[in-house]
Image (cartoon, rainbow, N blue to C red):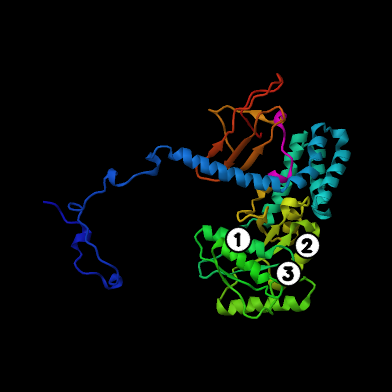
Amino acid sequence: MAFPTQLSLISKPSPLFSNLPRTRFNPSTTARPTASRFKCLASQTGFFTRLGRLIKEKAKSDVEKIFSGFSKTRDNLAVIDELLLYWNLADTDRVLDELEEALLVSDFGPRITIKIVESLREDILSGKLKSGSEIKDALKKCVLDLLTKKGSKTELRLGFRKPAVIMIVGVNGGGKTTSLGKLAYRLKNEGAKILMAAGDTFRAAASDQLEIWAERTGCEIVVAEKENAKASSGLHTNFSLMEELIACKKAVGKVIPGAPNEILLVLDGNTGLNMLPQAREFNEVVGITGFVLTKLDGSARGGCVVSVVDELGIPVKFLGVGEGLEDLQPFDAEAFVNAIFPLRDACCCKRLSHKSTCWPASGIYIVQMCQKASSSIVIMQNFPLYIIFLSCVLTCTDDNWCKGPWILS
């Protein structure tokens, strides 16, 4: 005799769960699912091949955007490899002086530059750093620490209360409208329903430009009937416009308690260190929660990213590296550091075997080989499963070069 289960003995729902639908369960009569009822996608022929191809194309595109976006900054810092390649203890002062000049040219700022150089000088004289490669690794670690200690919270804080409100502010010509469109496209692809509200309706064709972005991204938009309001932008020295910005923030908070969830300041990367006064003023007025740095794909002042984070302790949340819809990249400190500093060439790489390889735990790495090498390697790990793309096994004709594959040591 089969004993009834505990669920089948319940004849009446309890008052606490009286509104929930009731379903009796009898394991002896309930049909068990069979394997034929479920078709695993992985069992389809060529599934992983197609999946790998799609992921590879997307990963390669994202890596190239970040890496190429800081090419001019990387060119300014290319002297670092030349200095450290033949470094010795007697040349410490000369090397650090030229390193200081390279950092200043890239708009790291005097305070950050002095902090980095003096830290390296202390470690060199104490004997902690004994080679050029160790000095470069310490340099990258210094910059990474400056970015992560004060600007580690790079994710959007949208909270659980709906709707979430993101306020985009900035000076004229900084790229607010374009950044809004790209951000809306990204959030929509993540499953959010987006409503754009045009707050900069005083500038000529501002609403028309935002309507074009709303059409491109497939989002809804709200514009004012009378184009006489200007609150999202202006110059940070314009007192009346900044007061209107405060009024807008208060009005949003009255309608939706706790809003806005995020106040993002859009800064033009071409302005370099000149963005610091803007950031201070906007932060004092409305309380900035994050930065969006735009137009960095054509700027040689990538060091300003480190300066603005260290100066105000506010994280950079997005980087604009192009004009396309997908050219707004979430800020990743490690990927940024790897992009602005020149990578070591093949002579500084290690030969790794396929079977006993300890792959990096996270981050994006690109190994640029010498001109004799036939290709390069892109290794990306942003997934639970390590996905490694090797374009080919690298071989060089010179006997002094080992055969690939290669990975940055």
Calculate the distance from the C-alpha at mark 1 to the C-alpha at mark 2: 23 Å
Q: Quadrant of residue 9?
A: bottom left
Q: How many marks?
A: 3
What numbered label is drawn on residue 282? 3
- Mark 2: which amino acid? Leu
Mark 1 Cα within 10 Å, few/some/many (few <14, many 20+)?
Answer: many
Pointer 1: what residue? 183
Residue drawn at point x = 70 percent, y = 57 percent? 294
Residue 157 visible, this orientation? no
Residue 125 highlighted magenta (yes or no): no
Give above or below for 3 relative to 20.
Answer: above
Residue drawn at point x = 52 percent, y = 58 percent? 190
Nearest to N terminus: mark 3 or mark 2: 2
Question: Please, what secondary structure does the residue beneath circle 3 have?
Answer: helix
Mark 3 Cα within 10 Å, few/some/many (few <14, many 20+)?
Answer: many
Nearest to N terminus: mark 1 or mark 3: 1
Q: Name the spot of residue 76 as percent of width and height, x first.
A: 80, 44
Which image quarter is the C terminus in?
A: top right
Side of 46 where 285 appears, left or right:
right
Question: In this view, which residue lies farthest toward the left?
Answer: 1
What numbered label is drawn on residue 90? none
User: From which residue to which does the magenta span run?
Assistant: 337-347
Side of 86 where 19 appears, left or right:
left
Pointer 2: what residue? 276
Q: Are marks 1 and 2 in contact (CB under 8 Å)?
A: no
Question: Please, what secondary structure does the residue beneath circle 2 have?
Answer: helix
Side of 365 where 36 appears, left or right:
left
Residue 340 highlighted magenta (yes or no): yes
Q: Nearer the viewer, residue 371 or 20?
A: 371
Residue drawn at point x = 74 percent, y = 76 percent? 241
